[in-house]
Amino acid sequence: MASRLSADVLVVGTGAAGLTLALSLPRETNVYLICKGTLGTGATAWAQGGVAGVLDETDSVEDHVQDTLGAGAGLCEPKAVRHTVEHSTEAIQWLVDQGVPFTFADGSTLNYHLTQEGGHSHRRIIHAADATGLAISDTLINAVRQRANIHILEHHVAVDLITRHKLRGARDGDDQCLGAYVLDTRNDRVMTIGSRATVLATGGASKVYLFTSNPDGATGDGIAMAWRAGCRVANMEFNQFHPTCLYHPRAKSFLISEAVRGEGGLLKLPNGDRFMPQFDERAELAPRDIVARAIDHEMKRLGADHLYLDISHRPAEFILSHFPTIHKRCLEFGYDMTREPLPVVPAAHYTCGGIRTNTSARTDLKALYAAGECAYTGLHGANRLASNSLLECIVYARAAAADIAQQPASNFDPDSLPLWDESRVSDSDEKVVISHNWDELRRFMWDYVGIVRTDKRLQRARRRVQLLQKEIHDYYSHFRISSDLLELRNLVVVAELIIESALSRKESRGLHFTLTYPETQPTPEITVLTPDLP
């Protein structure tokens, strides 16, 4: 039986961006938080490195801005970069005020320990040992649970946004987001949630690739929903592959933090030789795209399944104090990083593109906001600088909350929204179609749209994704929905956006490297796709 709820603000996603936004709204605001699983199971909790910000007197806003612009390979939007960095100190202070237990410098109870990661010219990464994301997630979840105005709906998956144009069946230049249809995965019922403002904080889309460091929920839901609702997306061809994920059949590409290289870890071939100095003068501290391509190149040259990351030359006490979580996890798989090198392989890690937004996190659709990895703010450009992502979550979530709080009261009646209609669908007896298409999609994206691309591979991927689009649309139209089907439906949309964006870029830049166009064009331009809706 269908049901209906009403919210002042509907937040889809419960990572750093979604939780921050909910907590930053006035306490009298009626907020509903949609969580695909249970709180704390998203990508935020997996983040190890930290939050970048201007926190040391030897650092400056200008230096952080220049490092970000440099990593972004000419495609960062300077206004967005400066806005983010200028708000970094207050954003981190907000996290401190929430009680996030950041690590202090040795022997200090006043000054926080700052680490350095690839592409940064200063130590500016504040962290909670090597489990910063988990510390932030746990702290914000605890705070959210204390707020009477915040209602948490766990095991709920957003199906699609409800817009004025969808209800009218025509587009007249006055579109607005009115809420969303949401599936309760515990009983497979769809509810209608009307809202004065809706926020997409659904994370990235790295699950579109066969190998990823992300949790299973990173299926591009917000990007796909916004695209179907008429929002532009930008720079979807720039997918960051983390260079160093643990290579082990049971590890599911467990991430070995950038900070391991920042604290002296060396990348090595199977024979023990270093190779990064041959690719970049910054060696192991080069930006991730350079390191990932170097590893990919050496693996293909040698026919190797993996390479190695070695920090065992540092004192064991140092390793244990700086990387307790990584050390413990690696021990579970039989590797002692204090004594031996770790086998590593690149894996899809971060979606640099997304739903185009402004500095208030507004999208193209009235009353719809996007924050975190699903959004394109202009901060990351052609490559994300390490530890800028959590910073972006906090800065833009707080900006969205401030903008929403300033909006005039709406006379919108959520009871006017239609309930979900499934009168013309049936239960499927062919669910193998979903698992087969899911596997096929992720495999051809890995093979044809991975770290190194060609137009021939991209054209092949385009043909495959178009066939899958038709199959999945037909399945969605005739059978009752499930969380697996919704995620597959969203992933195939995101895959097509990545492929079309990659084909439109006739150069190699940042994370997009193509053998068809190995040179970089003199004039950088962002890639913007606009949906062709009736």
Image: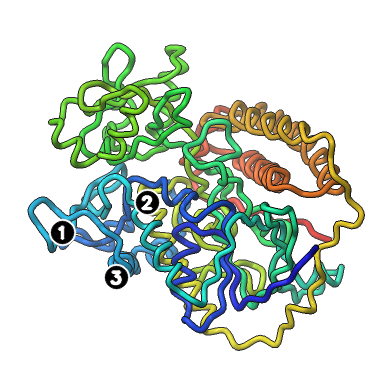
Could you tell me if residue 369 is visible in this image?
Answer: no
Label 1 residue SS: loop
In three-dimensional space, the C-alpha distance between marks 2 and 1, rounded to whole angstroms, equals 29 Å
* Along the viewing direction, whichever of 64 and 48 lies nearer the viewer: 48
Q: Is residue 272 left or right of residue 376?
A: left
Q: Local crowd at mark 1 within 10 Å, few (<14), some, or many (≥20)?
A: few
- Quadrant where the image shows the N terminus: bottom right
Residue 97 numbered mark, or none: 3
**Disc 2 designates what residue?**
134
Q: Position of residue 134 (x, y in %)?
A: 37, 51
User: Which circle's residue, 1 or 3, is located before the other in the chain?
Assistant: 1
Mark 2 residue type: Leu
Q: Residue at x 28, y 66 (%)?
A: 96
* Along the viewing direction, whichever of 300 and 167 lies nearer the viewer: 167
Q: Residue at x 63, y 57 (%)?
A: 156
Q: Disc 1, disc 3: CB below 8 Å?
A: no
Whether 450 is drawn above or below 356: the answer is: above
Whether 93 is drawn above or below 270: the answer is: below
User: Which circle's residue, 2 or 3, is located before the other in the chain?
Assistant: 3
**Disc 1 designates what residue?**
58
Whether 298 is drawn above or below 441: the answer is: above
User: Which circle's residue, 2 or 1, is located before the other in the chain?
Assistant: 1
In this rendering, the label closer to the viewer, 1 or 3 = 3
